[in-house]
Image (tube, helix red, strand yellow):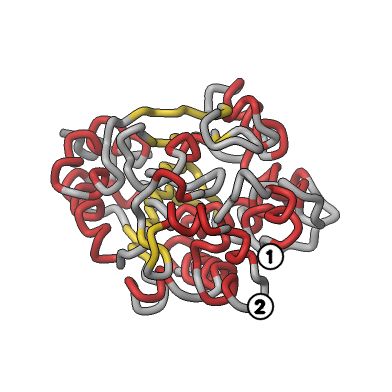
Amino acid sequence: MYFCVVSCSTLRPTVLMHGIHNSSANMDNVQSWIKEASPDTYVLNVELGDGVFDSIFGDITKWALDFIEIVGTDEVISEFGSFNLICHSQGNMFCLYYLGMYNSSFAKEQLPDYDLDSFPTVYNYMSLAAPAAGFFGDDSKFQFMGLETNDIARVGGSIIYTPDIIQLLVNPSGYWRDPMHLDVYRQLSLFLPILNNEISHPDFALNKQNRMSLNYYKMFGSPNDGIISPYQSTWYGYFKEGTLDEYVNANETDAWENLGLRELYEAGKLEFVDSGFYHTDYIRDCGKEFFEEQILPYLLN
């Protein structure tokens, strides 16, 4: 068990972001574990829209901007100037968008040509079961638009890239990454190719520099995840292009260079952790001891 050894009011705030099919209530355990160790630490448990329904349906970019507004305008966090971040599952998509595009104090120093407002910056980032490199439901039983994602994959997932329909109505379409049709994905997907710097865009350099500003980036995943497909995506690995039975690790992907992961790793600021957990174990009662050992020390700073 960890307890405050300094005045808790001097500790950074922590922001929580829940995953798909969830609401902020699903992060209540995490909030209580933080408060138990550090009662005066400010915790912002973010809700987007009405929770469960809006975690599935909508324009993922719009929800990412809502997340940025909620965090960026929070008076306590703004006054402190920085915060720690814990995001679960799809919630990482909103958190990574904030980190890449709005974590701007560092970017202002490194990229003075950018005209940026001042946003509070992310200090330590704890990523729980993120579809960081995308999602393709070939071996997942996750329900997507009422269908099993492995059925969508077999029928032809490129329909998900329909720009004026599916991508504006269903959040996971923003990070559906079909390894058999990556050319279509890069051309038509409106969210993840930009977020992961897979294509050229105006904020490419900003996105990389902002990510490199992290003090520590800890990514948790597991072969037992059961939802994220492939599970290697939780660590920026993925299916090898053009295959469904071969995989590449993060350091074999373009993200290693394009997102500054190599620099973070070589500086000892990036860690990949195999938790052994099922997808939701991180936020359930069974995850408390793991949280206290693996995550809580990065929040008491």
Q: Is residue 106 visible?
A: no
Say which of 209 and 278 sits in front: 278
Q: Is residue 38 visible?
A: yes
Where is the C terminus found, in terms of image quarters? Answer: top left
Residue name at image x 24 percent, y 65 percent:
25
The amino acid pointed to by label 2 is: Asp
The label shown at residue 117 is 1
Q: Earlier in the sequence, mark 2 or mark 1?
A: 1
Tell me residue 286's x, y (percent).
15, 41
Determine crowd level at label 2: few under 14, some 14-19, many 20+ residues with C-alpha closer than 10 A.
Answer: few
Residue name at image x 51 percent, y 53 percent:
153
Q: Is residue 239 left or right of residue 80?
A: right
Q: Quadrant of residue 267?
A: top right
Q: Circle 2 sits on which residue?
A: 164
User: Could you tell me which secondary element the residue under label 2 belongs to?
Assistant: loop
Q: Quadrant of residue 151?
A: bottom left
Q: Is residue 240 left or right of residue 9?
A: right
User: Could you tell me which secondary element the residue under label 1 belongs to?
Assistant: loop
Where is the N terminus found, in terms of image quarters? Answer: top left
Residue name at image x 52 percent, y 31 percent:
245
Residue name at image x 43 percent, y 38 percent:
231
The amino acid pointed to by label 1 is: Asp
Q: Is residue 105 left or right of residue 90?
A: right
Tell me residue 250's x, y (percent).
58, 30
Tell me residue 66's x, y (percent).
52, 72
